[in-house]
Image (spheres, coloured by chain):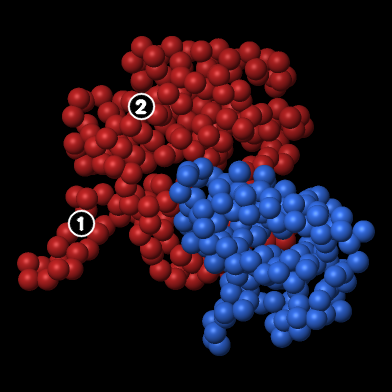
Chain colours: A red, B blue
């Protein structure tokens, strides 16, 4: 198993390669390189014999960074055609990738100096402008629910009373509350949601019938996004 | 030293809270609908109160939430970008500045979606009996909390 210094050097090479490929429009290669880096991080996190907690914690943060780079590579690949912004299916997929990528890069910006992330954040801003110029700031679905039980994934206790804070890393585990029991209450349409993936698109709005002023809209209301979804993936 | 004025005592008693246990706490984080709950409704804790509870306790402030007070409640998750903090009942004057700083810098500033439009919602009960119900933008709430902190310091100075 590598030590922290070897890990840093290896990840630095992966990061430079990803940036080079992204800058030169070689998105398949940037995605493949990001996947190699994620694989290294995943092995360290899941290694039961590794007792170096600092290395495990660092692997989670770096893994999330490369997962964000993978999102960005897929987004670039998906939007290669000149008129992508007018194609509903591509727009919906691209929006989800942009939200995933933004959330991951925002998270790692708490740990990694912002000047190292400039090229990524500029690319994210470019895509945000593409969406906002064509579709404005958007409207979103925002579900309301009564949560009866929520458990902490670090200690297994009631998340509302334990000491662990969502988003912090404890001994190689990214803390989050796992909802175990809830009652759905309703869905609101808002302009400032918690989850921007739940965007409602105009082409999914349909008139119920010609003689009626009612409309229906199809859209995502709840997602199962995880910053560190690579840890348990095959 | 708990500084409970008569009306506070009566109100908490009306909510079914065991007054004897209050001596163990400096701050209570109670359901947002503790006053307005209708019969048959559930007590609703605000999502922001979970993080506030953890930060207050990590700073050594004796803080109780609905569960600690024996209130059967559920978490009302709205999945909106606003910040809901529920009912914050400050019982001890000496912790006032620290609590205001935790709300301002750890909760409001670190909220996920940082936009100018972010709204905050809280019901703040102060040790001197003042009661502030706030539904408005985060920027104005900062100013309000800091002016309250300043007033509190001046009051403490005059009391001495």
> What residue is drawn where x is 71% and y is 85%?
B14
Q: Secondary structure at mark 2?
A: helix
Residue B24's spot in the image, x, y percent? 87, 68
Disc nearer the start of the sequence (2/1): 2
Q: Residue at x 87, y 58 (%)?
A: B158
Q: Which quarter of the picture shows residue B133?
A: bottom right
Q: Gap in Å between the C-alphas at discs 2 and 1?
A: 27 Å
Quick one: quadrant of the N terminus of chain B? bottom right
Is B76 situated left or right of B154 in this image?
Answer: left
Chain ID, mark 2: A
Which labelled disc corresponds to residue A205?
A: 1
Instruction: Using the image, determine if residue B31 lies above or below residue B49.
Output: below
Position of residue A36 in the picture relative to residue B73 (left or right): left
The quadrant the C terminus of chain B occupies is: bottom right
**Nearest the eye: A188 or B72:** A188
| Chain label for disc 1 | A
């Amino acid at each position: 198993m590598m030590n922290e210094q070897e890990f840093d050097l290896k990840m630095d090479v992966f990061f430079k390669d990803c940036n080079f490929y992204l800058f030169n429009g070689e998105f398949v290669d940037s995605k493949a390189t990001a996947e190699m880096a994620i694989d290294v991080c995943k092995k360290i996190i899941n290694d039961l014999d590794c007792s170096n907690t600092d290395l495990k914690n660092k692997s989670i943060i770096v893994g999330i960074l490369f997962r964000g780079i993978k999102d960005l590579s897929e987004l670039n690949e998906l939007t290669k055609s000149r008129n992508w912004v007018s194609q509903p299916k591509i727009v919906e997929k691209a929006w989800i990738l942009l939200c995933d990528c933004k959330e991951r890069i925002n998270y790692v910006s708490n740990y990694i100096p912002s000047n190292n992330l400039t090229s990524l954040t500029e690319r994210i801003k470019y895509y945000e402008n593409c969406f906002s110029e064509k579709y404005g700031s958007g409207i979103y679905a925002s579900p309301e629910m009564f949560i009866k039980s929520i458990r902490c994934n670090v200690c297994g206790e009631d998340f509302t009373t334990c000491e662990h804070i969502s988003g912090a890393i404890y001994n190689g585990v990214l803390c989050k509350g796992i909802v175990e029991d809830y009652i759905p209450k309703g869905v609101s349409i808002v302009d400032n949601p918690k989850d921007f993936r739940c965007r409602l698109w105009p082409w999914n709005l349909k008139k119920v019938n010609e003689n009626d002023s009612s409309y229906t809209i199809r859209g995502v209301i709840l997602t199962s996004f995880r910053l560190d979804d690579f840890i348990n993936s095959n | 030293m708990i500084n409970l004025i008569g009306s506070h005592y009566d109100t908490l008693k009306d909510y079914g809270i065991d007054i004897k246990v209050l001596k163990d706490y400096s701050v209570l984080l109670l359901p947002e609908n503790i006053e307005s709950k209708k019969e048959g409704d559930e007590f609703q804790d605000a999502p922001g109160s979970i993080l506030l509870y953890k930060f207050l306790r990590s700073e050594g402030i004796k803080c109780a939430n609905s569960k600690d007070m024996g209130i059967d409640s559920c978490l009302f998750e709205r999945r909106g970008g606003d910040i809901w903090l529920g009912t914050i009942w400050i019982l001890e004057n000496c912790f006032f500045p620290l609590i205001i700083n935790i709300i301002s810098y750890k909760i409001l500033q670190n909220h996920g979606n940082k936009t100018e439009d972010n709204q905050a919602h809280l019901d703040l009960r102060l040790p001197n009996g003042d009661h502030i119900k706030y539904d408005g933008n985060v920027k104005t709430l900062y100013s309000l909390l800091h002016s309250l902190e300043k007033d509190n310091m001046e009051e403490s100075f005059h009391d001495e």
